[in-house]
Image (cartoon, helix red, strand yellow):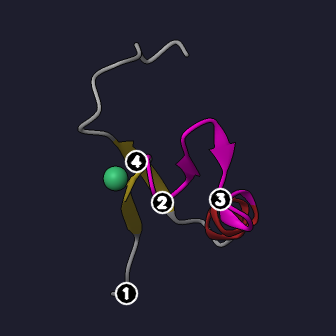
Amino acid sequence: MGVQGYLLDLDGTVYLGEKLIPGADRAVAELRRRGRRIVFLSNKPLHSRAR
Ligand SMILES: [Mg+2]
């Protein structure tokens, strides 16, 4: 059984400040296309989940 899912940090991995890190959206989409589950994590409690 291979990797089934990923835990991804958000700030500095998916975005930096207010900007998307180039390619992060495509990487996430590709992993999902391959059926991998992704859970996003953050240790930066400045915003709610709704944002
Ligand atoms: Mg980070």
Label 2 CB less than 8 angstroms from ligand 1: yes
The residue under label 4 is 39
- Screen quadrant of the N terminus: bottom left
Q: Which of the two discs, 4 and 3, labels the residue nearer the N terminus?
A: 3
Q: Which mark is residue 21?
A: 3
Q: Which residues are magenta?
A: 11-25
Up-down: is 44 above or below 14? above
**Alpha carbon of mark 1 to alpha carbon of mark 2: how far?**
23 Å
Assign a secondary structure to mark 2.
loop
- Tell me the amino acid under the disc marked 3: Ile
- Tell me the amino acid under the disc marked 4: Val
The residue under label 2 is 13
Mark 3 touching mark 1, by CB under 8 A? Answer: no
Residue 12 covered by magenta stretch: yes
The residue under label 1 is 2
Is 42 displayed left or right of 21 in the figure?
A: left
**At x 76% / y 65%, what residue is drawn?**
26
Q: Which of the two discs, 3 and 2, labels the residue nearer the N terminus?
A: 2
**At x 43% / y 18%, what residue is drawn?**
49
